[in-house]
């Protein structure tokens, strides 16, 4: 389930509006993220209702999309978070939070392909950091075009 499913109905419309405005400006998430100095995946995740956005970025988005700050109020809400085993919860949270954004970025960069989970690799490493060690998870899936098996549209 996508966190946007937990939003009030009025907020769903606000998120759809933001997406329409981004597309109307002809901006990819990567281009818009560069303009406001944030990570493209984080921004796409925010547009999917899965991130709380600080005021400084809301102001920058309003300027770039040429819309009022009031139209971005939905980004100030904290998304729903579930609870399970701590490690599994964090993995689910990461995929639930960033999954739709990752999908969008893959489509933007590939022209609408998917990532294979059959021809797939995964690796985990721990990186020492004086501020607290970091877990690095690498997911490496083959890029595949959507199948058009049979007569189109299938």
Image (spheres, grey):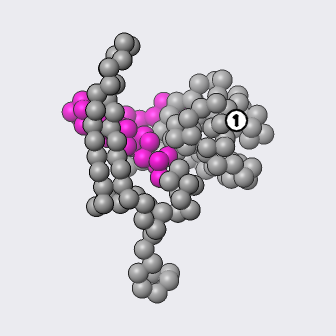
Q: Secondary structure at mark 1?
A: helix
The residue segment tinted magenta is 77-103
Q: Residue furthest left?
A: 85
**Residue in the picture at 67% in, 32% down:** 36
**Residue in the picture at 53% in, 59% down:** 110
In the rendered structure, the answer to whether residue 6 lies left or right of residue 67 reads: left
In the foreground, 43 or 105? 105
* Residue 38 location (% of width, % of height): 59, 32
Residue that mark 1 sits on: 35
The answer to whether any part of residue 62 appears in the image is yes
**Residue in the picture at 24% in, 32% down:** 87
27 over 87 or under it: above or below: below
29 over 148 or under it: above or below: above
In the foreground, 119 or 29? 119
153 over 138 or under it: above or below: below
* Residue 132 location (% of width, % of height): 34, 16
In the rendered structure, the answer to whether residue 119 lies left or right of residue 44 reads: left
132 over 52 or under it: above or below: above
Asked if residue 85 lies in the magenta stretch, the reply is: yes
In the foreground, 56 or 33? 33
Classify residue 123 by image quadrant: top left
* Residue 45 location (% of width, % of height): 51, 41
């Amino acid at each position: 389930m996508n966190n946007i499913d937990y939003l009030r109905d009025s907020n769903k419309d606000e998120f759809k509006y933001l997406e329409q405005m981004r597309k109307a400006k002809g901006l990819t998430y990567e281009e818009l993220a560069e303009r406001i100095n944030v990570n493209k995946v984080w921004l796409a995740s925010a547009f999917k209702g899965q991130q709380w956005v600080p005021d400084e970025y809301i102001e920058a988005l309003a300027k770039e999309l040429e819309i009022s700050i009031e139209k971005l109020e939905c980004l100030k809400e904290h998304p729903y978070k579930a609870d399970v085993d701590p490690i599994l919860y964090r993995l689910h949270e990461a995929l639930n939070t960033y999954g739709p954004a990752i999908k969008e970025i893959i489509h933007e960069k590939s022209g609408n392909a998917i990532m294979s989970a059959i021809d797939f690799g995964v690796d985990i490493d721990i990186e020492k950091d004086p501020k607290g060690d970091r877990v690095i998870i690498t997911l490496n899936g083959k890029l595949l075009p959507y199948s058009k098996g049979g007569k189109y549209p299938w």
